[in-house]
């Protein structure tokens, strides 16, 4: 994690964020895995454990680098504090496959429960209402397919940490080419100085988007959501526990009470098929993720797909991508 984080730290270090890092709220995120449960199965092999805390810290440093705005940087640091254990897997518990927004607690609610965090925000002149609507900070968050720091880390950490498709030097090269531009809505947006780095990033976006629409990731998330539902139905946890307990505590309960958990942890590949199997299986559509970055040109900032014809094919592949209708793991008959 240290080497990855170093890529994004600005020469002018934002010391004001350090006091927040050991608050109860941010410490909880140290136990929430970023890859929505993928760390608990051999279906994936991340380079190292990457948590919601790590993601939040990286996004804060990115945001500071591009804005040098204290309020937006703190908003970036705290943007995921309402995330439950297993993150978007819990959206699946609530049947929210397409938006993946139903499980997060409001930032104001979380802040209200942490007096130390409240005192630091007061010290920095920031009200919880300043954090609630992150879309007021366009470098931190904007609507897809625009590029923001939250989405940028999503693509970069997927390719470097999760899927091992790009080495750290390529992550650094891509990041170093980014600057702040003005988009078609007259808003600030990060984009690329050069077409070649934007095109490289587009190839990373394709990997990211397809993986998150693919059956392996969907299987992991659906399996964990069903296992968590089982714990809830057995009365072994309550919904509130997903926001207060360490993820490892829930994993311990899964290991003790879900007969197929060991098979899930040891699984190394999924089976794809066009017909429904007898095993526990997945078959559903999920949220499509995409990013079409801006590029600086002599005519002003342009979307990469409007200036490089071959990139249009890449985005068409992303838009039309579908994995097989069904997927399952042979060793998992039922939850």
Image (cartoon, helix red, strand yellow):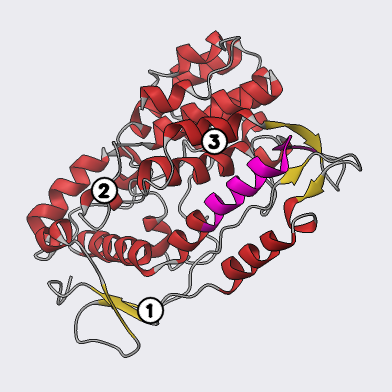
| Viewport quadrant of the C terminus | bottom left
CA gap between label 2 and label 1 equals 24 Å
Q: Which mark is residue 335?
A: none
Residue mark closest to the camera, 2 vs 3: 2
Position of residue 235 relative to residue 56, above or below, is below
Viewer can see residue 34 = yes
Q: Secondary structure at mark 1?
A: loop
Q: Quadrant of residue 43?
A: bottom left
Q: Residue at x 50, y 36 (%)?
A: 170
Relative depth, front residue between 26 and 221:
221
Q: Which percent across, then down, holds residue 107? A: 54, 37
Residue 250 to residue 54: above or below: below
Q: Earlier in the sequence, mark 2 or mark 3?
A: 2
Residues at badges 2 and 3 in contact (C-beta under 8 Å)?
A: no
In this view, the residue in front, 194 or 210, is 194
Residue that carries the numbered disc 3 in the rendered image = 79
**Residue shown at the point (21%, 47%) measured from the top left:** 250
Residue 161 in percent (x, y) is at 37, 40
Question: Label 1 neighbourhood size at 10 Å, few (<14), some (14-19), many (20+)?
Answer: some
First along the sequence among labels 1 and 3 = 3
Left or right: 222 as drawn, with respect to 265: right
> Dot 3 lies on which element?
loop
**Magenta-drawn segment:** 188-206
Residue 166 located within the stretch drawn in magenta: no
- To which residue does mark 2 refer? 45
Q: Residue furthest bottom?
A: 275
Q: What residue would you read off at disc 1?
A: 283
Nearer mark to the viewer, of 2 and 1: 2
Quadrant where the image shows the N terminus: top left
* 195 falls in the magenta region: yes
- Determine whether, in the image, residue 185 is placed left or right of residue 48: right
């Amino acid at each position: 994690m240290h080497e990855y984080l170093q890529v994004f730290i600005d020469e002018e270090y934002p010391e004001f964020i350090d006091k927040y890092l050991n608050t109860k709220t941010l410490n909880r995120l140290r136990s929430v895995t970023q890859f929505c449960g993928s760390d608990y199965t051999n279906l994936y092999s991340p380079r190292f454990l990457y948590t919601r805390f790590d993601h939040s810290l990286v996004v804060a440093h990115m945001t500071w680098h591009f804005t040098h705005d204290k309020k937006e940087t703190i908003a970036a640091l705290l943007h995921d504090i309402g995330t439950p254990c297993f993150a978007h897997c819990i959206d699946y518990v609530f049947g929210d496959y397409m938006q993946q927004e139903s499980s997060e607690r409001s930032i104001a609610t979380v802040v209200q429960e942490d007096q130390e965090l409240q005192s630091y925000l007061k010290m920095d002149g920031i009200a919880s209402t300043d954090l609630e609507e992150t879309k007021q900070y366009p470098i931190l968050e904007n609507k897809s397919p625009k590029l923001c720091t939250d989405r940028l880390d999503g693509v970069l950490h997927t390719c470097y940490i999760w899927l091992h498709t790009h080495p750290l030097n390529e992550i650094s090269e891509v990041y170093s080419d980014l600057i702040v531009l003005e988009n078609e809505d007259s808003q600030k947006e990060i984009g690329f100085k050069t077409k070649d780095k934007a095109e490289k990033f587009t190839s990373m976006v394709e990997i990211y988007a397809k993986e998150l629409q693919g059956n392996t990731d969907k299987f992991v998330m659906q399996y964990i959501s069903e296992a968590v539902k089982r714990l809830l139905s057995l009365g072994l946890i309550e919904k509130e526990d997903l926001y207060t307990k360490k993820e490892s505590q829930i994993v311990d309960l899964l290991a003790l009470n879900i007969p197929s958990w060991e098979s899930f942890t040891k699984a190394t590949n999924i089976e794809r098929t066009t017909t429904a199997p007898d095993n526990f299986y997945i078959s559903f559509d999920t949220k499509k993720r995409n990013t079409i970055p801006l590029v600086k040109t002599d005519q002003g900032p342009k979307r990469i797909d409007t200036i490089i014809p071959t990139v249009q094919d890449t985005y068409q592949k992303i838009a039309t991508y579908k994995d097989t209708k069904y997927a399952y793991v042979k060793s998992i008959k039922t939850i």
